[in-house]
Structure formats: structure tokens, C-alpha cells
Image (cartoon, helix red, strand yellow):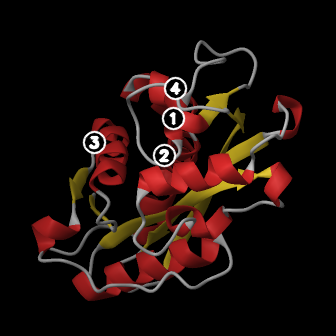
Amino acid sequence: MQILVATNNARKCAELQALLVPLGHDVSTPAEVGGVPPVVEDRPTFAGNAVKKAVSAARARRTWALADDSGLEVDHLGGAPGVRSARFAGDDGDAERNNDALLAALSGVPPERRGARFVCVLVLARPDGTVAGEFTGVAHGRILEARRGKSGFGYDPLFLFTETGFAATGRSFAELSRAEKSAVSHRGRALRALADRLPALLSAAGPAPV
């Protein structure tokens, strides 16, 4: 199966490719297919934005397209930054400024009130633009008072993974290797949910056109 990963975020693309290729699928990026139309992410939910991106890319390139929308929800901030995670400190999407803004918003808030979760919604669209499936992954943790770790991207240095029973527990996402992060991350969990359903989706789609 040929799948277009409908994101121009190089690090996000690398995460999705690393999880999809071992499943036996050919994965292409927008750069490899001549680009995809820009999409204004103006929906109020992760699912709404993911649907919009997947459908647009699938119709433009007449191929299966996978898009995600993901972000950070912080309890003390009423679920913010949410769908505005990449633009929390401004529309330029600067990760360092976003992290600084989050630290400032939580200044003085004790650890027990800094609960947070990363949410990812993946949407797979068929070549005709219809939605084949929607898959959600969530990772729970809390926001640290200072950055930890050098790996990952976005809010990873501030997100302490706190779910019990995992080797990654007690470390920030930026302290994990790519494989360690994928095992527990919101995106990894959403993609594994997709992988579980993919055989049925492909069977329902019938044979690929010759």
C-alpha cells in the first residue's frame, strides 16, 4: 500500500515513516510527490483538522493519505494550548517560544497541578477523499518546571511521562530515544491502532487498480 504522509513537519514525518515502513507499506512525503495544497487548520478539534488535511491531500494526489493533528492539553490551563499547540506563543510556530510561554503560564503552579496529556488523532483518507478511519492516541504526564533532555521536538523537553509500568516512566519525552518514545507516545499509540485496523480497511477497499 502506498501512503502519503500529509505533513510538511520533517520530524513528524520521520516518526510516522519509522512506524509505517516496518509494517510493509511504501511511504511518501509531500516533497516526494510534488507537494500538497496548504490547509488552514481552523477546526476546533484535533480530529477536525486531521480530517481536513487527510482529505485535501488524498484528493490532490489521488492516493491514500495519512494526516495527523496533535498537541498538548494542560489541565491547569483548561486544556490549552490544545489545537493551538504549535502557535501557543505566536503564529510563527517557534518551539522555544512556545515552551517559554508554557513555563510562564504555569509559573508558581505546584507539580500536582501540572497534569497534562499529549493527544494525537490520525486520519486515513482514501484516494477519492473519503475517510477510511480515525485513530486516537493519548499519553499522560505532567509539565516540568524546566526543560530536560535534548531529543524530540515541540514540548517534549517539558513533558514528563508519568504512566506507571513503563521503562520510560519518570523521563521527559526529550530524554527518550526515538524507539522508546514511539513505544509510549500519543502518535505511536494512534498508529498502532491504525495498524490493527489496516488489514480490514485494505480488504474493504478491494484490489488496487492496475
| CB contact under 8 Å: marks 4 and 2 | no
Q: Quarter-wise, where is residue 85 in the image?
A: bottom right
Type of residue at label 3? Val
- Label 2 sits on residue: 195
Q: Which is more N-terminal, label 4 or label 1?
A: 4
| Neighbourhood count class around disc 4 (C-alpha, 10 Å): few under 14, some 14–19, many 20 upward | some
- Label 3 sits on residue: 21
Q: Is residue 33 left or right of residue 117?
A: left
- Label 1 sits on residue: 157
Give the alpha-carbon distance from disc 4 to disc 2, as whole Å: 31 Å
Instruction: Point out residue 35 in the picture as x, y percentages from the top left corner.
Output: 18, 77
Foreground mark, 1 or 3, reads 1
- Would you say residue 119 is visible in this rendering? no
Give the alpha-carbon distance from disc 2 to disc 1, as whole Å: 28 Å
Give the alpha-carbon distance from disc 3 to disc 2, as whole Å: 11 Å
- Would you say residue 55 is visible in this rendering? yes
Instruction: Point out residue 208 in the picture as x, y percentages from the top left corner.
Output: 26, 69
For the residue labelled by badge 2, is the local secondary structure a helix, a strand or a loop?
Answer: helix
In-front residue for pair 161/87? 87
Type of residue at label 2? Ala
Give the alpha-carbon distance from disc 1 to disc 3, as whole Å: 27 Å
For the residue labelled by badge 3, is the local secondary structure a helix, a strand or a loop?
Answer: helix
For the residue labelled by badge 1, is the local secondary structure a helix, a strand or a loop?
Answer: helix
Q: Which is more N-terminal, label 2 or label 3?
A: 3
Q: Residue at x 40, y 37 (%)?
A: 152
Give the alpha-carbon distance from disc 1 to disc 4, as whole Å: 5 Å
